[in-house]
Image: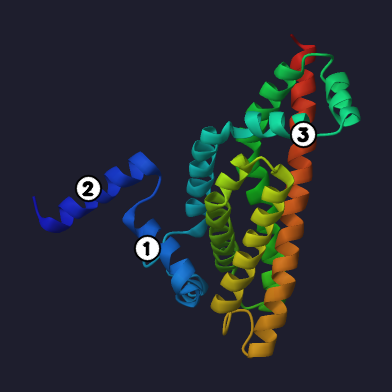
Amino acid sequence: MSEPKKRDDLNDAVEDALGFNFRSLKTLFDLFVRPRRVFESYAARDRVTYTPAIRIFFGLIGLQVLTSVIWGGWEGLLTRQIESSPTNVRATYVEISGGNLDGFISHYADAANFGQPILVALFTSLSVFVLGWFRPQLSWPSRLNIAMGVMCVGTFVGLLSMPLIASGNLMLAIWIGSLGVAVAYFLTIFRGGRGIIADSFAGTLSKSLIYTLVLMMLVFVAGVVLSLACMAYACMRLQNV
């Protein structure tokens, strides 16, 4: 068997096992180290040098779900959130669940595990309209890959900040994690966007700030929709029991 064939087989085996291949890891690494090169490749519709960012995004979300199990996943997160809430808030959850709080949390977690990657990807993909406003010449696939490339960096930073959830102060962990993700969004689009979304330093800076704010707003809206959808699903399942 030839050497290139062996590398291809190993690459495929790694992708089957982890959802990533070596090109995916190179893409993620370059999104941190040299994001401009990645964005230029996406803008040129180059499908060889780097992995499409949306594929990496879903791989990172899957890794995030697996890692979150260490800290109890969505079920543990919601349980800690309710336990640390004021008495009236906990009473509201008990009332919504019809007294079956454990069942409510379990169904909520099931829906969140399924719905989070879909809703976050759906809402954040709307940022392609902002990139189109910045640079109308960019094609739709180019805008989507750049947008999801920024999301990949933020998701990876969020993955690294997950141990904060076990710190005991959930709200502090959420605020620190959100701040880290926002900074990651800004630095990625700012460092990678020169010549892609704007030509001047000032233009790149201002558009990066706008894009970061829009992206954070879309992530927030996705979180609200996810929460409402999960609550509705949990209540429906409890009623059918």
**In the image, what residue occupies the spot 81% across and 34% down?**
85
The first of marks 1 and 2 along the sequence is 2
Q: Is mark 1 on a helix, strand or loop?
A: helix
Work out which quarter of the rendered image holds the C terminus and state it: top right
Q: Is mark 3 on a helix, strand or loop?
A: loop
The residue identified by callout 3 is 84
The residue identified by callout 2 is 9
Q: Which of 39 and 159 is in front in this view?
A: 159
In the orientation shown, which residue stands out farthest toward the top? Answer: 241
**In the image, what residue occupies the spot 58% across and 64% down?**
150
Residue 116 sits above or below residue 233 on the image: below
Q: How far apart are marks 1 and 2 (CA)?
A: 17 Å
The residue identified by callout 1 is 26
The first of marks 3 and 1 along the sequence is 1
Residue 168 sits above or below residue 198 on the image: above
Query: Nearer the observer, disc 1 or disc 2?
Result: 1
Q: In this image, 196 relative to 84: left or right? A: left
Give x and y (percent) for residue 83.
76, 29
Badge 1 amino acid: Lys
Label 2 CA crowd tier, 10 Å (few <14, some 14–19, many 20+): few
Label 1 CA crowd tier, 10 Å (few <14, some 14–19, many 20+): few
Give x and y (percent) for residue 213.
75, 66
Q: Are marks 1 and 2 in contact (CB under 8 Å)?
A: no
